[in-house]
Image (tube, rainbow, N blue to C red):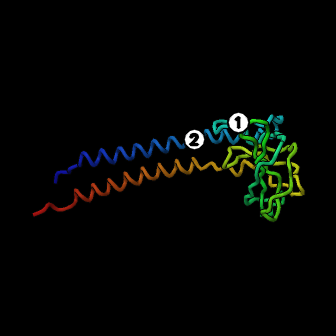
Amino acid sequence: MKRVIPIIGTLLVLAAVAIMVALGIWQLQRAEWKDGLLATYAAAADQPAIAYPMVSTDDDPPYFRGSSVNCLEVVSWRSTSGRNVSGQSGWAHIAQCKTGGGEGPGAQIVAGWSTTPDNPEWAGGTVDGIIAPDTQNIIRLVATEPVAGLQQSQPPSIDDIPNNHMAYAVQWFLFAGIALIIYLLALRGRNKAPPKA
């Protein structure tokens, strides 16, 4: 019996497999980039403190660098779940501070930790700390010395920054291999099927 290979179906499967392999290679490149980034963050603790950036971008945020901010005025507070230096669960209190006379972005300062979400009584001042990622404002300063009677929040750690790119690469390569195997099995079954009477 002559084996027939469907041209269009084969091309579609090969195109899909090629895309998945390309995505896997891209994730490998991302994993290498992330490893370098994490190495930079790990070395940041040994570098001198920097001025707190008034404008930060996603391209090269100065995470884990020491810095300080003069909070001229607390504009608002937000409380998020957090831990203190002992690992106890509770609330991290983040002050949105005015740092200049203009309408600039100001600064987000993790003033400290407590067991309740109630806003602390703090009007502002100079705070030393470590620059950390912030989901809403890219960066924030985690105070090394808490204010307003709060306890010290857990310092930022590079362990909290995920690096899943290698796992994603493996997944894409597996998807490509599985798709190819399924297609070959389907093709084999089709060619084994008896001709219709």
Residue 67 horizontal side relative to residue 133, left or right: right
Q: Quadrant of the N terminus?
A: bottom left
Nearer to me, 178 or 140: 140
- Expressed as whole percent of the image width and height from the top left, the position of residue 103 reads 72, 38
Q: Nearer the viewer, mark 2 or mark 1?
A: 1
**Label 2 to label 1: alpha-carbon separation:** 25 Å
Name the residue at 57% across, 47% down.
165
Mark 2 is surrounded, within 10 Å at the Cα level, by few (under 14), some (14 to 19) or many (20 or more) other residues, namely: some
Per the image, the residue denoted by label 2 is 30
Image quadrant for the C terminus?
Answer: bottom left
Is 174 placed left or right of 156 in the picture? Answer: left
**Amino acid found under the numbered disc labelled 1:** Val
| Disc 2 element | helix
Q: Quadrant of residue 29?
A: top right
**Residue drawn 55% across the image and 42% down it:** 28
Q: Amino acid at mark 2?
A: Arg
Q: Nearer the viewer, residue 67 or 16?
A: 67
Residue 58: name its quadrant.
Answer: top right
